[in-house]
Amino acid sequence: MQRGKIRQQHKAIADVAEKPKIKKLTKEKVADEHNSATDHLDLAHRGIETIETNAFDAATALKRLDLSANKLTRIAFTHNMSLTQLKITSNVLVDAGIVDLSFCKQLVTLDLSDNKLARLPGASLRHCTGLRALVLTKNAMTSLEWVPSLPGLTSLIVSHNRITEISAKSIGKLKGLTKLQLYCTPSSILSMSLNQYGHYNYRSSHNKLTELPDLSALEQLTELRASNNQLTALPASINHNVNLKIVDVCHNHIDTFDGLDQWTSLAQLKQLNLRGNPICGQNSTLPMELVDSAKEKEEDATVSQVDLGGTYKVATIDHEVFFQ
């Protein structure tokens, strides 16, 4: 699978190799590149370093814009855009380089992965009331205190950052979340991606969460992924997230059932992944409260997978249980 992905990346680079590089994106260059009959513009892998302030003056009808794999340190719009999807991954954007997002009020998806961002301008991001997905993987985030109130946001992906703590107050501003991803690669494993020059970027930065915040405010949450952090326990408050279907906390430092034994209201839980935690090596059984709850939920065919990894003695549950 990895080889196939690498081949696709090489092909993508080959496809744009014949296109001329654009060091400075101007209004004229945008006009040359954009087919007015379409609502999207792909300027990925073009070597762009700067963008003139008026570059998109004549492209206000654009819905999708991809500026990935360039050399941008700054992005700014000076008038209202119709963009619903904005992708600027694998650049060198820094905090001061995200000047104002309030001109992109119609954004639905914003992907700024693989940059150098520690935060976004919350004041202007607040104007993006239609934003549904915010992807900030592989940046320099240390917290989420900057996050504004975005009740319409359904997906927040901040994996592979440097986050050590998340407050209930900051996450509570995102009451519509259904997907929250905080996972990372282990510190001993370097993630790898192909840049625009055909070389590999290696990154070892990763989240270091020691505990999960109270997520009770996220009533619609269905997916929680926080693998490869430094969690030592799971909060009992997750029992309030009754719509959860997937909980992946593999490869942490969880060594206790405290908190987990209170998860008796998760009637929709389908996957629980505890693989790679110290708790999986204990010669004990799952808390009977959780077992009883799982048995009760069997009639509704809800719980389908409990992945504990390791050698683990589990009280009999008539659901799929995977060991390794």
Image: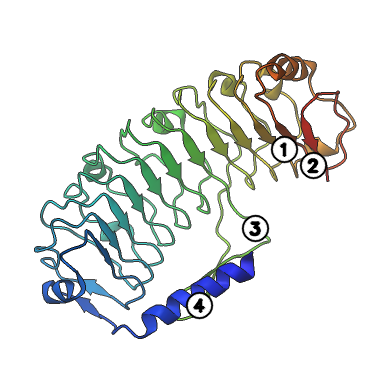
Q: Under tag 2, what secondary structure?
A: loop
Three-letter amino acid code at the position of disc 2: Gly
231 or 14, nearer to the observer? 14
Of mark 4 and mark 2, the one earlier in the sequence is: 4
Of mark 1 and mark 4, the one earlier in the sequence is: 4
Gap between marks 4 and 3 measured at Cα: 27 Å
- Could you say where residue 255 lies in the image, as x and y percent from the top left? 76, 34
Compared with residue 146, is residue 317 higher up or lower down, i.e. above or below? above
Of mark 1 and mark 2, the one earlier in the sequence is: 1
Q: Are marks 3 and 2 in contact (CB under 8 Å)?
A: no
- Could you say where residue 32 lies in the image, as x and y percent from the top left? 16, 76
Q: Nearer the viewer, mark 4 or mark 2?
A: 4
Q: Quadrant of residue 235?
A: top right
266 or 115, nearer to the observer? 266
Label 2: how many residues lie within 10 Å, few (<14), some (14-19) or many (20+)?
A: many
Compared with residue 125, is residue 304 higher up or lower down, i.e. above or below? above
Three-letter amino acid code at the position of disc 3: Ser
Residue on which disc 2 sits:
309
Gap between marks 1 and 3 measured at Cα: 19 Å
Horizontal placement of 276 versus 169: left or right? right
Gap between marks 1 and 4 measured at Cα: 36 Å
- Could you say where residue 7 lies in the image, as x and y percent from the top left? 56, 74
Residue on which disc 4 sits:
10
For the N terminus, which image quadrant?
bottom right
Three-letter amino acid code at the position of disc 4: His
- Could you say where residue 319 lies in the image, as x and y percent from the top left? 77, 28
Gap between marks 3 and 2 measured at Cα: 20 Å
Residue on which disc 3 sits:
187
